Image (spheres, rainbow, N blue to C red):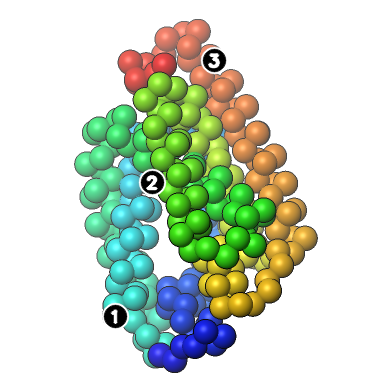
Amino acid sequence: MFSSENGCPAFQFNQIWNFLNDNAYILGAFLLAFGLFFTFAGRKVFKPAICLITTITVGVILTGFMYSVFLNNESANWVGWLIIAGSAAVGAVAGVFLAKFTKLGVALLAAWGGVAVGLMSYTAFLYMIKSQVFFYCFIVACAGVFAILTCCLFDHVLIISTSLFGSYLLMKGIGCYAGGFPNEATLYDEMSHGQNVPVTGAFYGYLAGFVLTFIAGAVVQYKIRSKETENGRHPYYKNRV
């Protein structure tokens, strides 16, 4: 692999992104389905949501590791799908286990809501800060704040974070078909190599859609919460604050 300070980032970018771009139509369908689930039903069925988010988290980490170690530009397409399937299977086992630890699982859900806020904020307003340390510290800080808040605002953070994360997935899913939604990692990679990469107007349309979808999801979830609070019907009432 060749690299230089001003070289083309395509030669340095992880192979996983090339694979996802080649299969964007399949990825988009999953993102849309998961996005709808988290946005409007994240709290209602939060134990399955915990299982799903753990599957995604572990699957992404394992997939990224396997791709970076074992795949190259000549690898067959089926190998990529095999790695993703295997990583997802391991993640599902971890998800079933973590769903038994409710508060820890909700903290993970909340952290992903923070990640969504961090990524959208970075891409929209902070992408000109060309610092790898700032990028990762900002994302981790957003995730950490949301996760910590679950200790004192369990129910509210659960609703807000799942709506945020689901809205992000929905916009990414639409972007797989309509285009115009930048890959945050690619954006940083290009800018770190000295390229001027302005965010297009299309992204700010996605940002508006992200905000509106988040509001709609939160309103729906709060209405469901209100009805359950009145009737005392929520099966995990003891975890709510």
Q: Which mark is residue 4?
A: none
Viewer-nearest of discs 1 and 3 = 1
Labels 2 and 3: the sequence-earlier one:
2
Residue nearest the viewer, comparing 224 with 194:
194
Distance, label 2 to label 3, CA atoms, is: 25 Å
> Residue flagged by tag 2: what amino acid is it?
Ile
- For image coordinates 46% across by 88% down, the residue present is 3
Which numbered disc, 2 or 1, marks the residue that appears first in the sequence? Answer: 2
Instruction: Indicate whether 85 appears above or below 163.
Output: below
The residue singled out by tag 1 in the image is 70
Which residue is rendered at x = 55% and y = 40% of the image? 164
Q: Which residue is mark 3?
A: 226
* Lower sequence index among marks 1 and 3: 1
Quadrant occupied by the C terminus: top left
Residue 72 point in image, percent of width and height: 37, 85
Q: Is residue 71 above or below residue 147?
A: below
Q: Which mark is residue 53?
A: 2
Badge 2: how crowded within 10 Å, few (<14), some, or many (20+)? many
